[in-house]
Image (cartoon, rainbow, N blue to C red):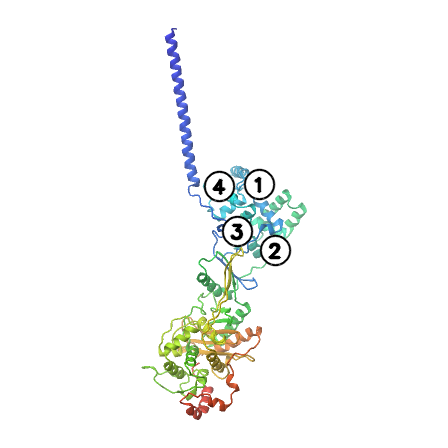
Amino acid sequence: MTTTYRADIESARKTRLRRRRATFFAFVLTTLIALAVSGFMLWRYLFNDLPVLPSNDELWAVNRELSIDLVDADGNRLLQRGPLYGQAVDPDALPEFVVQAFIAAEDRRFYDHGGADVMAIFRAGFANWRAGYTVQGGSTLTQQVIKNLVLTPEQTLRRKAQEVRLAMQLEARMSKSEILSLYLNRIYLGNRAYGIDAAADVYFGKDVQDLTLAEATFLAALPKAPSRMIADPGLEDARERQRYILSQMVNEGFITLEDAQLAADTPISFVAEQGDNPLLEHVADYVRDELEQLLPEVPRDAVVTITLDVATQQAAYDALQETIETEGNARGARNGSAIVMGTDGRILAMIGGMDYRESQFNRATQAMRQPGSSFKPFVYAAAMEAGLRPYSVRVDERREIAPNWSPRNYTGQYYGPIRLRDALANSVNTIAAQITMEIGPERVVEMAHRLGLGTDLQAYPSIALGSDETTLFDLVRAYGAFARGGERLDPYLIERVENTRGEVIYERTAYPPARVLQQSVVEDMNEMLGLVVTEGSGGRARIEGWNVAGKTGTSQNWRDAWFIGFTNDVVAGVWLGNDENEPMERVTGGSLPAQTWGAMMSDILENYEPSEIPGVGRSDNLSDAQLARVDFYSELGDAFRAAAPTRVASISSQGGTQ
């Protein structure tokens, strides 16, 4: 073989080698590129839409349904709307076995991993592959926090990968104690209860600090399938899961075998379900609306301290119910409402209707109805401010007050010269209309608005008789100025708003009240409104041993009947009528509403001491001669002294508009 031939063979061999190497390198390169592209595509698939992990504070509120927890001044729960979140608990302040139960149940290596437990994931994957379906989960407590608060519940590789990555991010940001706190306070445990504090209350009626080992391990068994486990009357799955948790706690050295055996054998006894008070449903709706007015954003876990007094609420409802189910039923009065306010502005009771299930409409705050003669105090207050006095005299007679309008009295009779105090006490229509035109309807409207009526009022002559509509809430508020010595009553129901972590979102601050009436006007008005109860149309509202003042009201055709009254401590109002605006059977404000008000307030005032109302009963200390001389400015004083004795007696016995 020649040298040339050998050289050619060697050259060919080297060429083939180079080609093989090139092919190999091309294959490797192609594979690497394919792997890189595939990896990039897989990464994009898994993490392209990875949610941004909320801030630590935001994690406490994210994905919460709106929950409003109404509590009284002592922190007692009155009513709860939406899910029950309970108060945030600090894991470090709990009995050790409570926290250990959840760790043993869900994540025994919680303090050893960085968010994801790789060994647990592989172990769960193998078990699920061997079983052919999901029998184990490999999620850590941190992953469960992410799954419940940030991600969707879908069971896919994509969601699992995102869960692991976000869990690692969370572990880098928060301490183990903070993560555990999130878990224990946000985990769903069935029966509307989110978090261990809420669950301890719902199931066992106790504070989480007072849970027994048996109760704590039972709650720790629920996160796997809370709704299904609780629905089982025998609690078989829950008790089996509980026994597993107890065994794990023994293995981890958390408890002794004897402790575990005792807890496993302890029966689980639930407290009776605490239903919401149906008398507070209208109140809850009102609070929700008020929260949206007070706060730029309502916390999803609002704990609202309200001023309502449960005993007062019950007394108001009982009085209304008694009236409607007896005389009211016979006389076509099928519904009613009531408002009770302290003279300090606290709303103590709010009855928006007799059955919230039938109608959520709040007749105390939303129903626009004609107040009738219960509007007249604003007419007389404007008149007193303009210089008239309770002893000023006007003539009760048929008179055209405005074109084509001649108001009539309830009795159809006219009584001649009459003092204003007696005209208001007996609700004489013609006198209210006369003095309205005398001082101007605009002045009456301004007075009503100044005292607190927020509704739109027209300055027509008929405003004197309450022709424009308003609400019971506004009427009671406006009467508050008489009870408060001329200071406007600004009612409030919400005292404070917190979240379940105890952070105060809103707290009412006291402010100087606005003076809307001079003291002399207040005393004049209180004298006259006191006479409504002692000598006039509101006699059924009289309460033995108490100064009471107020006014009756009846709208056209007996569609609405009112009594608004006050003592020195409490202002309250009652309305009776029908939602369909159907007339009642001659129910006037001086009949069933005044009677209901008296019964309601008799119960409520048991918690108060009687006190005088400035101006009420003032004329009792004047002699007949003094009474005859007080009206220095009336041009009809002589006529009154000649004619009033018999006519006043007549009108007192027969009554005016009620």
Dot 3 alpha-carbon crowd within 10 angstroms: few under 14, some 14 to 19, many 20 or more: many
Q: Nearer the viewer, residue 345 or 585?
A: 345
Q: Amino acid at mark 4?
A: Arg
Label 2, on which residue? 269
Label 4, on which residue? 165
Q: Amino acid at mark 3?
A: Arg
The reply to whether residue 97 is in sight is yes
Dot 4 alpha-carbon crowd within 10 angstroms: few under 14, some 14 to 19, many 20 or more: some
Q: Earlier in the sequence, mark 1 or mark 4?
A: 1
Q: Earlier in the sequence, mark 3 or mark 4?
A: 4
Q: Mark 3 and 1 residues: CB-CB less than 8 Å, in contact?
A: no
- Label 1 residue SS: loop
In three-dimensional space, the C-alpha distance between marks 2 and 1, rounded to whole angstroms, equals 36 Å
Quadrant containing the N terminus is top left
Label 1, on which residue? 112
Q: Earlier in the sequence, mark 2 or mark 4?
A: 4
Q: Earlier in the sequence, mark 2 or mark 3?
A: 3
Q: Earlier in the sequence, mark 3 or mark 1?
A: 1
For image coordinates 57% across by 57% down, the residue present is: 201
Q: Amino acid at mark 2?
A: Ser
Image coords of residue 656 (percent x, y): 43, 84
Label 3, on which residue? 186
Nearer to us of marks 2 and 4 is 4
Dot 2 alpha-carbon crowd within 10 angstroms: few under 14, some 14 to 19, many 20 or more: few
Image coords of residue 357 (percent x, y): 47, 64
- Label 3 residue SS: helix
Is 22 drawn above or below residue 115 in the view shown?
Answer: above
Q: Earlier in the sequence, mark 2 or mark 1?
A: 1
Q: Amino acid at mark 1?
A: Asp
